[in-house]
Image: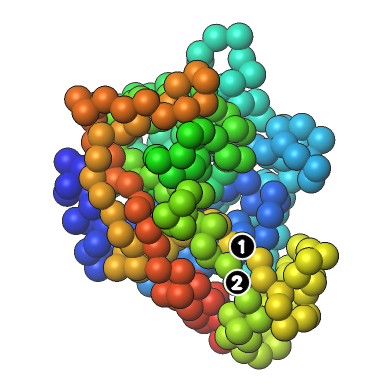
Amino acid sequence: MTIEQVLADIRSDRVKKVIFDSDTYNEMDDQYAISYAFGCDKIEILGLTAALFHNDRSESPADGMEKSYHEIKHVLDVTGRDYPYFRGSPTPIDALPEITYVDNPASDFIIKTAMESDEIIYLLVTGAITNIACAILKEPAIIDKICVAWIGGQCLSSDACCEFNMEGDFRGAQIVLNSGVPFVYLPAFGGNKGGGTVKLQARPKHLDMLKGDSEVCVFFRETLPKEFTRPDYPYGTPNWLRILWDIGATGVLSRPDAYKFSIIPAPVLTDDRTYAFDSTRHKMIYMDDVDENIILEDAFTCINSLGQ
């Protein structure tokens, strides 16, 4: 498929086959994004894969991946779903002495699923992009079988390109952006234009959309927000808010009408962590903006349906 055909497919009502790759334990947004996909009638989940991360919630990238793997199981249990899920790479490609893949179950699942499919597989990626980079390095033929929608980086007008997800495996991001794989670039930060998935800020009115006392509704209305409360916006207060960056990946397939997309040459991620531009490069889909009100309402409506 050409990139124009991929965008037309995204905008169609066809049910899309999806693998969800996330650093699920890192923040609360992954749990919402995954469950949003579970409740969306435009998405058929084929499996979930655990991405690495390293911050104050993990001792190492490997520990972050392992915690994310177990958190996927937690979300499956809460929502009553039974999808296959896999451990990802414990090591970022960035940490290796040379560019090569790290064998891991997640990348092998991506390869097997893509190569056996008679239609495009969408990879919704909400963390470091290591598992996808490893899959592409191990079996480049999957480039013609998948589309990667990734939340990472800054808007293209920014002086620097990195944010948390890209910094988690910068070399992995370079590999994927250079591979020519059909790619939907969803910047986390939108710069002076105010775009980016940082706009996706849940508030009390969104939690109130989760009706009833089912395990799903209580978990997403009360339990998870309490765990990730913040001192400046404490849970239970009228001014509570939490950025749910990663629901932006699910929204691409659920409500593509909420996005402003452009088809542009893929940027070069330079070694000094900036963007460079070359008009002869292969093309990608770029998110210029997103209507946060549409995506937030859609996400919570889909999650609420899981508990009814």
Residue shown at 40% from the left, 40% from the top: 157
Q: Amino acid at mark 2?
A: Ala
Q: How many marks?
A: 2
Which quadrant of the rendered structure holds the C terminus?
bottom right
Q: Residue at x 35, y 53 (%)?
A: 288
Q: How is the image coloured?
A: rainbow
Q: What amino acid is at disc 1? A: Ile
Query: From the viewer's perspective, is 107 left or right of 25?
Result: left
- The answer, for residue 58, to whether it is visible in the render is yes
Considering only vertical position in the picture, is 45 above or below 127? Answer: below
Q: Secondary structure at mark 1?
A: strand
Query: Residue 88 falls in which quadrant of the image?
Result: top right
- Pick whichever, 70 or 252, lies toward us: 252
Q: Which residue is mark 1?
A: 243
Q: Position of residue 89 (x, y in %)?
A: 61, 31
Above or below — where is 88 with respect to 254?
above
Mark 1: few/some/many CA within 10 Å (<14, 14-19, 20+): some
As drawn, 88 above or below 278? below
**Mark number, residue 140:** none
235 sits left or right of 270 in the view: right
Residue 224 relative to residue 115: left or right: right
3D distance between C-alphas at marks 2 and 1? 6 Å
Looking at the picture, tell me which residue is in the foreground, 261 or 126: 261
Query: Can you give x and y, in whole percent of width and height, for residue 217 in the image?
Result: 65, 80
Q: Position of residue 104 (x, y in %)?
A: 58, 29
Question: Do labels 2 and 1 touch, CB within 8 Å?
Answer: yes
Mark 2, residue position: 202
User: Does residue 38 show up?
Assistant: no
